[in-house]
Image (spheres, grey):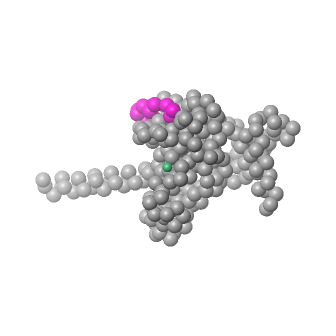
Amino acid sequence: MNFFSKSNIIVAGFLLAFVSTTSAHIGYTGRDFGTFTGNGSDTPKLIASNTVTGDFGWASGTDANLGDSHKTRAFKFSLLATGLVTLEIQGLDIIRSGVPSSSLPHPGFSIFKGLAASGSHDQSAASTAYNNATYGVGNWEGSFNALGDWAVGVDGAAADSPLSYFTYVANAADGIAANYGNAAGIRSDGVADGFVKSSFILGPGDYSIFVGGADISGTSTASFGFNATLSVVAIPEPSIYGLLGSGIAVLVVAYRRRTSVR
Ligand SMILES: [Ca+2]
Ligand SMILES: [Ca+2]
């Protein structure tokens, strides 16, 4: 082997390592729903043909050892005023960049206040330091908490560098405990059909949404396809809360309680 071919191999190896590392960062490229006013003038936004690795990424974040955010997909949106936010995730067979992906069988998602800084990574030194201190060494498999607050640090930064914090807001999951497990606090839609849709009254701010597979016993690390649609309407009159379902009503009460103590 001559010098040049060796160099090429080294360069190729370096590039592969670089690509695999950067592609694993939490990012929103192509998955920004944009800014919504909350005043009733917003049009729904569809982000089609997304993929996620694995059929269990969201469900894994519901258990005690958290989950690996690489097995979820991050989206973001901003809200200028309090509104009724509806997110729907439809698993479907897609072809993206010529590569087919089968339908995400049971989608689940969680919404958080806060955004990930560019380059955020579950296994960064800062994430590791935070998770070890918060959960204990060996007690976490990633940073993603589907049912509570979590934090993540930037890859390549010092262990004591600033973190991005996600403040838990709400979740929803397709199906029943048979697929998503028995963790307390999961908001089920009760019908395991590859589709989940849920509505929440949210205040102004910047939000992240993490979508992944809701199969707690899932093991596939294949790529799965789904569409995501976010819509925001003005807050309905209190008299029709009951018509919209108890889940929304509970969230309204929770929101009012939180705001009333501030
Ligand atoms: Ca887990
Ligand atoms: Ca469903």
Name which residue lies at 61% across and 53% down: 148
Q: Quadrant of the C terminus?
A: bottom right
Left/right placement of residue 228 relative to residue 158 reads right
**In front here: 63 or 258?**
63
The residue at the far left in this view is 1
- Asked if 224 appears above or below 57 in the picture, the reply is above
Does any portion of residue 243 appear in the rendered image?
yes
Does any portion of residue 227 appear in the rendered image?
no
Left/right placement of residue 191 relative to residue 15 reads right
**In front here: 242 or 209?**
242
Left/right placement of residue 254 relative to residue 186 reads right
Residue 41 rendering spot, x and y as whole percentages: 76, 40
Name which residue lies at 55% across and 39% down: 180
Residue 31 rendering spot, x and y as whole percentages: 56, 44
Q: Is residue 212 magenta?
A: no
Residue 244 rendering spot, x and y as whole percentages: 77, 35
Name which residue lies at 42% across and 53% down: 22
Residue 170 rendering spot, x and y as whole percentages: 66, 47
Name which residue lies at 63% across and 37% down: 188
- Asked if 144 appears above or below 239 in the picture, the reply is below
**In front here: 4 or 200?**
200
Q: Quadrant of residue 39?
A: top right
Q: Main secondary structure of the magenta part?
A: strand
Count the numbered circles shown: 0
Q: Which residues are magenta?
A: 94-105
